[in-house]
Amino acid sequence: MSAAVDTVRETTPPEPGGRPRGRAVTLRLGPISARFRWRAVLVPLVGAAVVVLFAALSLGRGDYPIGIGDVLRTLVGAGDEGQRFIVLELRAPRTLVGVLVGLALGLSGALFQTFARNPLASPDVLGITQGASVGAVAAIVLTGNSSGAALLGGLGVPLAALLGALVAGALLFVLAWRAGLDGFRLVLVGIALWTSGTALTDWLLTRAQIYDAAAAYVWITGSLNARTWDQAGKLAIALAVLVPLALAAGRVLGVLQFGDDTARGLGVRLARAQAAVVVVAVLLVAAAVAAAGPIAFVALIVPQIAVRLTGGSRPPLLASALLGAALVTGADLLTRTVLPEALPVGILTAAIGAPYLLWLLVRGRRTLA
């Protein structure tokens, strides 16, 4: 059986702005053929390499610097006892949680933006992260304890945040559903939930004692401080189930982009497919915010960066996930090594994402004009 690789020019229209989508490759193996663009393959590979690099640097940087060679020896079971404790017990859980949270947020943002066909559709704008904030702040304020240990069977703030995100996602789904889900209506309902969640969080903070309010503010900015293997393990289990489901939704998302009528004509059960995509995206966000708090704007900006790097027509799922992991891990590394004071990682991602959101709104206004 012979195999052949043909390089051809991309025949699909250029992406918005007139930029070419690049060259495509057709791979033929007997009667089977597949076509892909080099950029769509190269970007995820580079993203994965950047994640590995940032993770290795993160494991070695801190108050007690450790060289990358010593980090690698520690990871394979060598190294002295002090290095093993620092790398494996103090830094590795934090780094792993950062990678997994970034992966979940980037993937969730790509799902929402592709489904809604709107670059503003992200968990931050749709009110899901605000729902998590309400749950976490309520746990802290009601128990008078920064861990919320007396609430929810001792599971505390993470479970409260998880429940808050799921409730917000359920409200988003129910209120936006009208014999199906429309992307425009989804965003409008999400903005209303965002506003309501922000107001409720502010009200809870005004009712809190000063120490509880300070602890709540740290959590709702999104932080990787003091992450543990228990949190990393639970998040890894959740993503082991959700990530394959999200990637499997890629084909359905491609069909949904052509409109509801076309999707029905191609045999897609529209309501079921829409519901499945939204549920998986909400669960990804809920798992991420339960582990590290609402790290802002990652799910908003990463899919748009990925779609521009790959030159596609919609945010690529795998590239968005890996770039999200790279952004969170890199931002955490910067807050601990470059900035004069260690800050929650959510502050840096918000500083990056807020100007981008303003630019996106101004650009959209000019397009409408």
Image (cartoon, grey):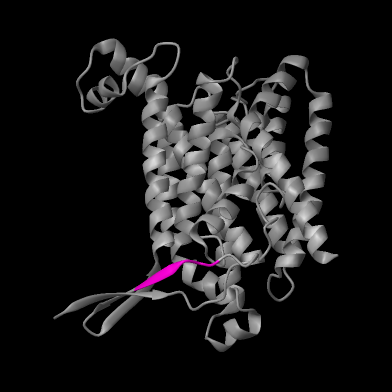
The answer to whether residue 282 is visible is no
- Which of 212/264 is in front? 264
**For the point 81% across and 60% down, which residue is it?**
366
Quadrant where the N terminus is found in the figure: bottom left
**287 left or right, relative to 179:** left
Residue 264 placement (x, y as % from top left): 59, 85
Q: Is residue 195 above or below residue 309?
A: above
Task: Please give the count of numbered marks on the rendered protein.
Answer: 0
- Which of 60/148 is in front? 60
Q: Is residue 191 above or below residue 228?
A: below
Q: Is residue 12 above or below residue 83?
A: below
**For the point 59% across and 74% down, which residue is it?**
256
**For the point 86% across and 65% down, which residue is it?**
369
Residue 115 placement (x, y as % from top left): 62, 66
Please tell me whether residue 60 belongs to the stretch shown in magenta: no
**206 left or right, relative to 183:** right
**For the point 68% across and 34% down, which residue is it?**
351
- Give the residues in magenta: 20-25
**247 left or right, relative to 254:** left
Residue at the farthest bottom position = 265
Residue 246 placement (x, y as % from top left): 48, 60
Residue at the farthest left position = 1
- Which of 257/306 is in front? 306
The answer to whether residue 284 is visible is yes
Residue 359 placement (x, y as % from top left): 74, 48
The image quarter containing residue 93 is top left
